[in-house]
Structures are given as structure tokens and as C-alpha cells.
Amino acid sequence: MAKKRGKKASAAGRRKAPARKRAARRSAGRKGGGAARRGASRTQAPRQRGMPPGMHTVTPQLVFRDAARAIDFYKQAFGAREVMRFPGPGGKIMHAELRIGDSVIFVNDENPQSPVVPASPNQKPTASIQLYVPDVDAVFQSAVSAGARATMPPSDMFWGDRWGMVADPFGQVWGISTHVRDLSPEEMKKAGEEWMAKNMPQQSQPPPAY
């Protein structure tokens, strides 16, 4: 009888051993998963103090005489997504936010009390916005089809970008780029000198902004 009980106990122990191993694995998995999640949260880039989520340090703010029409244009030309819109008196837009790629721009209608005036198609703007995209030719054509004026067709530039420029119907100028190759400072300097020698023999105008 003692031998039989010993055999039964041994068999029961063998049956329990895989069960204990499975339980141990599940416990380790739960612990490991929790540690991995905690580790991932620790390795995420910390949110910068004083900055809303999704924003960058520098944010352009564009002023228009017809901000609603400008928003529609940027949606069509650049695939902009409207994040929010805060209406002002008289159907004007006091503040709106558009996301283009990973960046946000602010848009609003002109305000007589503001020191900022809208860009104008009849005057050269004081600044341009540079836009990096995966396919400069496609976005350039999209902007022109939406009503922008082509000021420089896309071409391969000496600093490693394929780059073009458009002026939108409201007078704002946009540089559109796709980075195509990396250059060292020495290579860029040499390529820039060759470009200027070919395109600016009399030094009559500065090289394009980039």
C-alpha cells in the first residue's frame, strides 16, 4: 500500500510540475510586461514645460483678409488638417490652427488693433515658409492646381534638396522641399560655389534662400 501511495504521489507531482511552470511563465510575463511598459513610458520624450501637446517651439502665425478662404486653400494645396477654429465678430476668424505634416500654423483674420498686416499678392512678402514633404513635385503641382502661382519650378539644389517655390493667392510665399542627399559642409560649400559661378557670373543677385 505504501508503494502504491508513493507511486500515486509521484505521478501527481509530475502532473503538477507543468502546471507550476505555466503559472510561473504567466507571472513572469505579467511582471515583464509591466516593466516593459514602465520602461517605455520612461524613455518617451518628456513634454516640454509650457508647451501644449503637439506643438513645436516656433509656430508661424499667418494673417489674412479672408482667413476662411485661406484655410480651404491650404487644405487643398498642402493637405492641411483643421485642428480648431475660434470665430470672432462679424463671421471673422479670431484664431484657427492647421496641421501640415507634423507642424502647426496659426491662422486668423486681420485685426485693426494688431501690429500685423496681411500679406498681399501685389507686394513682396517679408518672409517665406519652408515646407518639407516626401514628394516636392507632387505637392508643387497640387499647390499650383489649387490656385498658387509658380515662382520657381522644383529642381535639385546644391544643398541637397529638391526645391521649388510658389506664391499662394493671398501673397504668402512657400518653399517646398524634399531632401534627396546628405552633403558635408565642405561638399555643400563646393557645390554652392559651382552653382554661383554658373548662375551668377556677375554677382548681380543673391543665391536662393534655403
Image (cartoon, rainbow, N blue to C red):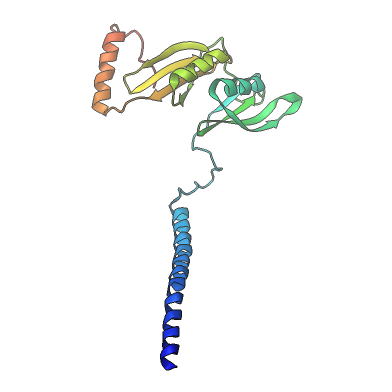
State whether residue 117 is above or below residue 59: above
The percent position of residue 175, horizontal first and vertical second, equals 45, 20
Quadrant for residue 183, please give it.
top left
Quadrant for residue 147, please give it.
top right
Looking at this view, is 150 or 67 the one in front? Answer: 150
Q: Quadrant of the N terminus?
A: bottom left
Q: Can you see residue 199?
A: yes
State whether residue 155 is above or below residue 42: above
Q: Quadrant of the C terminus?
A: top left
Total numbered circles: 0
Looking at this view, is 141 or 66 the one in front? Answer: 141
Residue 3 falls left or right of residue 121: left
Which residue shows up at 64% across the image and 22% down it?
67
Looking at this view, is 173 or 23 the one in front? Answer: 23
Residue 73 falls left or right of residue 192: right
The percent position of residue 199, horizontal first and vertical second, equals 31, 9
The percent position of residue 197, horizontal first and vertical second, equals 26, 11
State whether residue 65 is above or below residue 42: above
Residue 86 falls left or right of residue 48: right
Looking at this view, is 78 or 210 the one in front? Answer: 78
The percent position of residue 149, horizontal first and vertical second, equals 52, 11
Quadrant for residue 178, please give it.
top left
Which residue shows up at 47% across the image and 67% down it?
27
Which residue shows up at 58% across the image and 21% down it?
76
Q: Can you see residue 200?
A: no
In the current view of this chain or complex, which residue is farthest to the right?
Answer: 90
Residue 170 falls left or right of residue 25: right
